[in-house]
Amino acid sequence: MTLRNFGFCAIVLASAACAKPAASSHPAFQPGVVPANWYAGGRDCAGRPDFNVRAYNDGLFILRQAACKNYEKPFIYLIVGTERALLIDTGAGKVDVVTPVDSLVRAAAKRRGVSALQLIVAHSHAHGDHIAGDSQFVGRANTVLVGRDSAAVRAFFNINHWPQDQGTIDLGNRMLDILAIPGHQPASIAVYDRLTGVLLTGDTFYPGRLYVRDTAAYALSVARLLAFANAHAVTHFLGAHVEKSMAPGVDYPVGTVDQPNEHQLDMTQAQLVELDSVVQAMRGRFVRSVRRDFTVWPQTP
């Protein structure tokens, strides 16, 4: 099976037809592209692959689950080093996630001149629409499935004091920083790729409904994300969903499958500053706050 079967746009990685240049760049980073459009289709699955797979560059891949398989349409990410690859999330279920991931990992190993790469499967957090494909990776050779609770995440990524400290993982000439960001869910993490400057923010920061279950933890996590971004150059903030329309402040209701005019995936540091300001102003008394590019949405724990 070839990459084309998964909607892999751009073996010509910089093709203007499928992607746009990075919103910000830094000479120290490997360049890459984020697709301008992530349309996930409607209810009809005819002729549509389970995942739309795009390459940011030859070591970072973005996969979006088809809308016809699950209305959540989550994004998952694969980051590849010279010795191992890290998969962040396994989708919302009803799809074959192993096949496209294996295809990408095998191709990456070939480009790197090695026979195989170890695959580590971890999660942005432990909600069902991000872990449903876990069973497909259980008991596989050369595969590590990281536990879903905060204790397992802390131990695997060597985070000494959760959530204040940061962890790291070396994929082989590719170091990632792991930030604990509970609040949406107790085991939530963000992942920073030092090679590209991309920061993966899961369900904590993305263009949509930012559900908050622990207001105190969430406020501290957003502040922690902003402090990290202030100390490190970030080229893109990439979350796990798109729920906002391009119309300012308008989101697609829960359960919406077809989103033809949705917000772009990547967010900006200015929007993170705005989120931090909104959250800090609430002083723990969270109320729903609709903004242009996101909605802070407190929920009962």
Image (tube, rainbow, N blue to C red):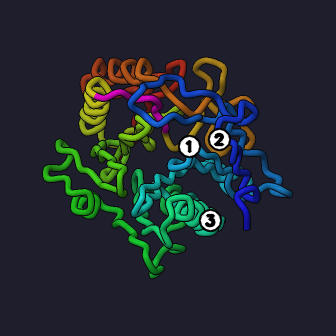
Q: Amino acid at mark 2?
A: Leu
Q: Dot 2: within a 10 Å radius of its alpha carbon, few (fewer than 14), some, or many (20 or more) residues?
A: some
Q: Earlier in the sequence, mark 3 or mark 1?
A: 1
Q: How far apart are the alpha carbons under marks 2 and 3?
A: 17 Å
Quickly name the residue at label 2.
13
Q: Residue at x 57, y 47 (%)?
A: 62
Q: What label sits on residue 103 in the rendered view?
A: 3
Question: 169 left or right of 124?
Answer: left
Q: How far apart are the alpha carbons under marks 3 and 1?
A: 16 Å
Q: Residue at x 44, y 27 (%)?
A: 288
* Number of disc labels: 3
Which label lies toward us, 2 or 3?
2
Q: Amino acid at mark 3?
A: Ser
Q: Amino acid at mark 1?
A: Asn
Q: Earlier in the sequence, mark 2 or mark 3?
A: 2
* Residue 6 in view here: yes
In percent of width and height, residue 219 lies at: 28, 31
Q: Residue 97 or 83: which is nearer the viewer?
A: 83
In percent of width and height, residue 195 lies at: 40, 41
Q: Which residues are magenta?
A: 232-238
* Residue 285 in view here: no
Q: Earlier in the sequence, mark 2 or mark 1?
A: 2
Within the image, what quadrant is residue 36 found in?
Answer: top right
Quickly name the residue at label 1.
57
SS of the residue at dot 3? Answer: helix
**Residue 17 is one of the magenta-drawn residues:** no
SS of the residue at dot 2? Answer: loop
